[in-house]
Image (cartoon, grey):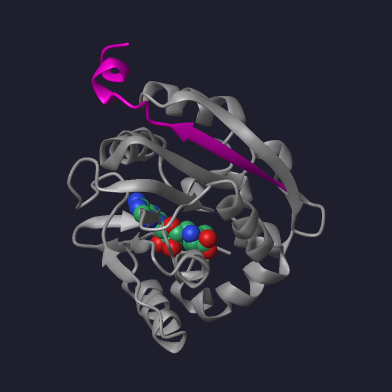
């Protein structure tokens, strides 16, 4: 399957299922390969509290954002993605569930939010869609929009060793995009973006045992000033 980079206002991005044509099957395929379970684990690691503000960066069809709002009704939930088709699906999903979730069109390395806007930022199965330079900028942007004391909760496929072969593997873009997704590399990028003691919070096997998912956590210290000068 040839991957098509879609355009949005002069910029390209890799859409959720690799191509717009496959987007209608994305939720089902992700569920079958263990994605729903993985997002629940990620959410459980975030220790969300009532009244907090949450961003899901690269929210795609909005499954995690809608789940957060369903489980934590008093939390303000915002999802962001460059893909208007995925966002349309996300908005329909929230409407069907009668939940108020805001979905914004944009890129994770140019977040359209003020500094310290969120208590938690989530990113699920998104990082491997970014080019190497975009990853670093994204993590810096996430740090900027997080409140002091806030945290990033990220999950993604592991490096190339976890790549499987066949249709489902191509669906997750294993061959090209996992090359830049090794654990050490992600942790180093988080450190460079000023996250305090970023760590791997867990591993899980998905895709019927063929691929590894890695959970990461990075905290913003109570004083951002100290961290920025480290
Ligand atoms: C595999 S999907 C994951 C979607 C969702 N987070 C989930 O758990 O199902 C990757 C998403 O990243 C989005 N994406 C690609 N490039 C992006 C960028 N530069 N900034 C934000 N999102 C991006 C794609 O449009 C796609 O919706």
Q: Quadrant of the N terminus?
A: bottom right
Q: Is residue 190 left or right of residue 100?
A: right
Q: Bounds of the magenta span?
A: 212-230
Quarter, ligand 1: bottom left
- Residue 190: percent from left, percent from top: 44, 28
Question: Which residue is rendered at x = 54% and y = 53% of the image?
Answer: 125
Query: Can residue 207 be spotted in the picture?
Result: yes
Question: Which residue is rendered at x = 62% and y = 59% of the image?
Answer: 40
Question: Which residue is rendered at x = 72% and y = 37% of the image?
Answer: 161
Q: Is residue 25 left or right of residue 111?
A: right
Would you say residue 217 sits in the magenta stretch?
A: yes
Q: Is residue 68 left or right of residue 34?
A: left
Taking depth in this image into account, of 43 and 127 the one nearest to the observer is 43
Would you say residue 202 sits in the magenta stretch?
A: no
Location of residue 5 with respect to 197 vertically, above or below: below
Query: Which residue lies most toward the bottom here?
Result: 96
- Residue 215: percent from left, percent from top: 61, 42
Query: Which residue lies most toward the front here?
Result: 50
Location of residue 38 with respect to 212 vertically, above or below: below
- Residue 213: percent from left, percent from top: 67, 46
Question: Which residue is rendered at x = 45% and y = 88% of the image?
Answer: 96
- Residue 200: percent from left, percent from top: 62, 32
Query: Can residue 173 be spotted in the picture?
Result: no
Q: Quadrant of the C terminus?
A: top left
Query: Which residue lies most toward the right here?
Result: 209
Taking depth in this image into account, of 3 and 89 the one nearest to the observer is 89
Q: Is residue 35 left or right of residue 150?
A: right
Q: Image quadrant of residue 183?
A: top right
């Amino acid at each position: 399957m040839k991957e098509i980079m879609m355009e949005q206002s002069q910029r390209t991005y890799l859409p959720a299922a690799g191509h717009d044509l496959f987007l209608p099957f994305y939720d089902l395929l992700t569920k079958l390969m263990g994605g729903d379970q993985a997002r629940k684990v990620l959410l459980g690691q975030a220790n969300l509290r009532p009244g907090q503000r949450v961003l899901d960066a690269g929210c795609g069809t909005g499954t995690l954002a809608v789940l957060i709002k369903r489980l934590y009704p008093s939390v303000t939930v915002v999802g962001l993605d460059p893909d208007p088709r995925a966002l349309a699906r996300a908005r329909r999903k929230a409407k069907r569930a009668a939940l108020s979730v805001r979905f914004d069109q944009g890129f994770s390395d140019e977040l359209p939010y003020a500094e310290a806007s969120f208590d938690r930022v989530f990113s699920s199965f998104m990082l491997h869609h970014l080019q190497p330079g975009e990853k670093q900028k994204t993590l810096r942007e996430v740090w900027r929009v997080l409140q002091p004391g806030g945290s990033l909760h990220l999950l993604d496929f592991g490096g190339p060793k976890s790549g499987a072969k066949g249709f489902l593997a191509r669906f997750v873009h294993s061959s090209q995009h996992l090359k830049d997704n090794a654990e050490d590399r992600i942790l180093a990028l988080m450190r460079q973006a000023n996250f305090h003691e970023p760590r791997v919070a867990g591993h899980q096997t998905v895709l019927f045992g063929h691929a590894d998912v890695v959970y990461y956590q990075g905290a913003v210290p109570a004083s951002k000033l100290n961290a920025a000068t480290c």
